[in-house]
Image: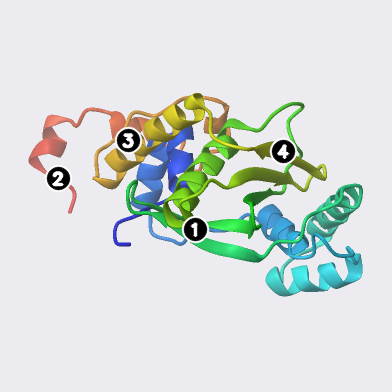
C-alpha cells in the first residue's frame, strides 16, 4: 500500500509528531533497539521450554555485537518469563494493513482468537502503557478490516513476564487512535507540527533541533534559502 503510515510512526506521533517529522528528513534506516531484538528472539520460544543457551546463541546471531549488558538483559527476561504459562501462536511477524486508515505494521504473535505485541520492558503497576494501547488499537482495526471479526489484543511484557489484555478498544482508545492518525497524516504531508514537550525530550535524538525548526526565519534566510 503506497504512502501508508507505519504503525510505529503513528505511535511516535502520539508522543511527539515533530520527532517523526525530523526523523523523516534525516537519512538513515530505523535502528531496532537491542532490547526489542532480544525480546523478539525469546518470544520465538514462548509456549515451549526456554533454554537459555539455545536462545542466547540465536541472540548472538541476530546481534553480533551483543555483550555483557545484552547477556544480563536476556537472562533476566528469560527468568521472568519462566514464571508464566505462555500461549503458542499460529503465526509470527504477521504483516497487517488497513486501507481505510492508510496504516501498515507487523503483529508480533497471532493466535486463532487474538494477537499480541512483544515488549522488552516490565509491565506498569496496572493496565497497559498508553503507547501500547494505541498500538493494539491500530492493529485491532487492521485485523478487523481483513478478517471481518474482532481479535482480542494483548501486550506481552517480557521484562516482567507479564501479559496484559485489551479485549476491544474502548471509546477513549479509538479517540486516541484518530488523534494520532490525524497528526501522522499531517506529518506525512510534509507539514511542520508543533512539538509535544515532556520527559521524552531528554532522550530524543532531535531535541537540539526543535527550536531551530520552529524559529521564524530571518530576512537573510528568506532571501537566501539553503540549497
Query: Mark 4 packing: few (<14 Cα in 10 Å), some, or many (20+)?
Result: some
Is label 1 or label 3 in front? 3
Which of the numbered marks, if any, corresponds to residue 227?
Answer: none
Mark toward the start of the polypeptide (1 vs 3)? 1
Mark toward the start of the polypeptide (1 vs 4)? 1
Q: Which residue is mark 3?
A: 182
Is label 2 or label 4 in front? 4
Query: Mark 3 packing: few (<14 Cα in 10 Å), some, or many (20+)?
Result: some
* Separation of marks 1 and 2 at Cα, in angstroms: 29 Å
Mark toward the start of the polypeptide (3 vs 2)? 3
Q: Which residue is mark 2?
A: 225
Image side of residue 216 versus residue 98, left or right:
left
Name the foreground residue: 28 vs 128: 128
Mark toward the start of the polypeptide (2 vs 4)? 4
Image side of residue 41 versus residue 84, left or right:
left
Badge 3 marks a residue whose secondary structure is helix
Q: Position of residue 25 (x, y in %)?
A: 33, 51
Name the foreground residue: 14 vs 147: 147
Image side of residue 91 versus residue 141, left or right:
right
Badge 1 marks a residue whose secondary structure is loop
* Separation of marks 1 and 4 at Cα, in angstroms: 27 Å
Q: Which residue is mark 4?
A: 164
Badge 4 marks a residue whose secondary structure is strand
Taking the image as drawn, is residue 209 in sight?
no
* Separation of marks 3 and 2 at Cα, in angstroms: 30 Å
Amino acid at each position: 500500500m503506497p504512502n501508508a503510515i507505519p504503525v510505529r510512526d503513528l505511535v511516535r506521533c502520539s508522543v511527539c509528531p515533530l520527532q517523526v517529522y525530523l526523523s523523516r528528513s534525516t537519512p538513515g534506516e530505523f535502528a531496532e533497539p537491542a532490547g526489542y531484538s532480544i525480546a523478539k528472539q525469546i518470544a520465538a520460544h514462548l509456549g515451549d521450554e526456554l533454554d537459555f543457551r539455545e536462545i542466547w546463541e540465536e541472540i548472538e546471531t541476530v546481534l553480533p555485537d551483543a555483550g555483557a549488558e545484552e547477556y544480563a538483559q536476556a537472562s533476566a527476561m528469560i527468568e521472568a518469563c519462566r514464571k508464566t504459562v505462555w500461549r503458542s501462536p499460529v503465526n509470527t511477524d504477521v504483516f497487517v494493513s488497513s486501507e481505510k486508515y492508510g496504516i501498515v505494521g507487523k503483529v508480533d504473535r497471532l493466535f486463532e482468537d487474538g494477537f499480541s505485541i512483544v515488549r522488552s520492558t516490565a509491565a506498569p503497576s496496572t493496565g497497559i502503557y498508553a503507547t501500547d494501547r494505541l498500538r493494539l488499537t491500530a492493529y485491532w482495526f487492521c485485523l478487523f478490516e481483513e478478517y471481518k471479526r474482532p481479535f482480542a489484543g494483548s501486550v506481552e511484557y517480557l521484562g516482567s513476564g507479564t501479559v496484559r489484555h485489551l479485549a476491544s478498544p474502548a471509546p477513549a482508545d479509538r479517540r486516541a487512535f484518530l488523534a494520532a492518525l490525524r497528526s501522522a497524516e499531517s506529518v506525512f504531508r510534509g507539514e511542520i507540527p508543533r512539538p509535544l514537550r515532556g520527559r521524552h525530550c531528554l532522550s530524543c535524538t532531535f531535541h537540539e533541533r526543535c527550536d531551530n525548526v520552529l524559529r521564524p526565519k530571518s530576512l537573510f534566510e528568506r532571501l537566501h534559502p539553503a540549497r
